[in-house]
Image (tube, grey):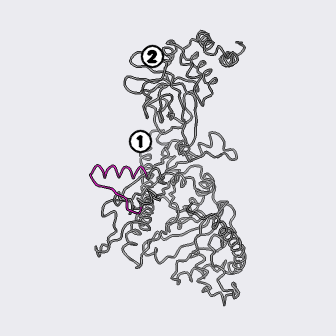
Amino acid sequence: MSHNGIAHVEPGLTGEVVEASTSEFLAQALELDAAPPFGAFVEVAADDALTVYGVVAHVQTAGIDPGSRAIMRGHGDVRDERIYQENPDLPLVLRTTFRALVVGFTEGQEIHQFLPPRPARLHYSVFTCPPLTVRRFTREGLEFFQALLTASEVPNDELLAANLRYIAAETGEGQAFLERAGRELAQLLRADYARLTAILRRCLAPGETV
Amino acid sequence: MPLDLLDLSTQVRQMGEQLARRRADEQHRLELLDAMLADYRDRWEELADLAETVTERVAVPTGPLDERVPPDVRPPRYTALATDGAEIDPDRHGGSGEFYLINVGRVRIPYGQPERDVELRSVSSLGYTDEDLFIVDPRDPRRQVPMRDRHLDALRTVEELRALADLAESEVGARNIRAEDASSGQEVSVRKATAAQSAPAIALVDGTLLFSVLEERPRDFLRTRFYTDFVHQLERLRRAHVPVAAYASRSRGIDLIHLFRAVCGSTPLVCEVCSGAHACAMRGLNDAQLLGRWLDRWDRTGLFRVRSNVHDPYYGGHRVYFFLVNTGDEIARVEIPEWVARDQASVALVHAILVDQCAKGFGYPAVLARADDRAVISLGDRDVLDTLVQQELARQGVVARPSAKLSRKQVRTV
């Protein structure tokens, strides 16, 4: 795997914050093409007492220099991985970034599912949340669904469905969690049945129906 | 609006017509010259002898003029080293004090050697001491020349080659370390050592090895200062056994044209080729137009030595040779020092690697493009540097005021 210029040091470490605001943060993945999956939970420290939680809402790979554009490099039988072998400088001029929507934070021992008083700190490390944290955060409540459903410039329904599948798998709670999430969603989307079923259908195992 | 676009558009149209006429005229004159080229094709030794008697800078042929050399097979494993530079001139109007900045992009790309790291960096250095800002004649300290404009260009050229020599020496160092590892008998190291040793390296700079130092008097202290330092870096590269080449995209070199003008004496009225025209048929043409027409894609011409009264006294064993190469869309000129030119294997290696580099870089060597990326100083970077300097001056209690002219430009009054 090609590096984005930083060596791996800690398990779960996945990137570094390069833009931060109250409602979202942008991070550069440690390795090219190795961002956490769409819909995954990530965490970053804002300071010693505050940890901000986010859900990965967008992943992008492009040139590091804002003015540079990737161009087609394949020719003959040089395709896919061979293009990287033929141009070993590419991993140093490309980068993968991911945008995470802030869905909550912990201050001290308390988990909150609303926006934190301070944003994530620029250049701080972003970690993929361990399953235990995902379980603690989602057991606290599912109010953060609202943030995913109303965020702008993201495919909201796809994002929420991806997040539901991620939680079901990571926590090992599977169907039980999906039923609880379905009840929460039914409250939030009681006026929009079509949208509700569209989201739930994206979370079903093959052969199941809503 | 600062440009009178209405008036300009008329001028642009007139210029377009003129350029089209000139292009047709050049084509016609090139056809006239074909006869002369055919005449001298195999009499290149005669031309070479003549070249030695000319005072102007000329190309000295080392073989038949129509020599065409196809490239060797592109090496699958090699290391490409390149540097490129950019500078910020001392700003007379800025008021932040006199300083200049040279930024050198240094790049090492090991191809086909996944066990080795790619290096892309830039090294910036500020010149601000009296020794930096003035070049002093060692024989007459009263003669001081400010380091700016063309002189700063020359200094940047030297710094580019110094960085390239640093890269080449570290390349040799890396090989030696691997070789030592290999002798310790560890299997992995043995494999790495063989890898590094079997992968050749070449070093590239953009432009020319024959950079100019403007001055009125020949053999003056300015030339001595820049050329001596430059040649020292070439010598470091030679000792590191890394062939070096300067690559000029769409070459407009006219060393061969100068040679032919010396042949005919540039007197069109009595010239058979020009047949009594008022101006020489070679006027405005360049070497690439003369020789490049015969080259197929990736082929190169034979080698020509540049005989230069300005450079040769300083360059010694690093006198410059060049060949032209067809990269598909254009004719590029590749300059190499004598020690590379005299080694056929090195010339073939430089040619084959440049072909691979141009293929990877869509017509321009990929490694040089990366070095250029790292060298460029953006407007944003300039602003950051200005702010840094002004903050530091303020901290030291020095007032940094722009000149009246610059203040007037920054704040437009009506």
Q: A157 or A61, which is in the foreground?
A: A157
Q: Position of residue B179 (x, y in %)?
A: 44, 47
Q: Chain of mark 1?
A: B
Q: Is residue B67 visible?
A: no
Q: Which segment is the magenta one?
A: B383-405
| In front: label 2 or label 1 | 2
Q: Is residue A65 above or below residue A125?
A: below
Same chain under badges 2 and 1? The reply is no
Q: Position of residue B94 (x, y in %)?
A: 38, 59
Q: Is residue B287 left or right of residue B173?
A: right
Q: Is residue B275 visible?
A: yes
User: What kind of residue is marked 1?
Assistant: Ser
Q: Residue at x 73, y 76 (%)?
A: B28
Q: Is residue A93 above or below residue B287?
A: above
Q: B212 or B51, which is in the foreground?
A: B212
User: What kind of residue is marked 2?
Assistant: Ile
Q: Position of residue A82 (x, y in %)?
A: 62, 42
Residue pointed to by mark 2: A111
Q: Chain of mark 2?
A: A
Q: Quadrant of the N terminus of chain B?
A: bottom right
Instruction: Report the residue that reaches farthest toward the bottom.
Output: B270
Residue pointed to by mark 1: B184
Q: Is residue B385 magenta?
A: yes
Q: A67 or B352, which is in the foreground?
A: A67
Q: Position of residue A66 (x, y in %)?
A: 54, 45
Q: Is residue A201 magenta?
A: no
The image quadrant of residue B147 is bottom left
The tag on residue B104 is none
SS under mark 1: loop
Q: Residue at x 58, y 27 (%)?
A: A38
Q: Residue at x 70, y 12 (%)?
A: A210
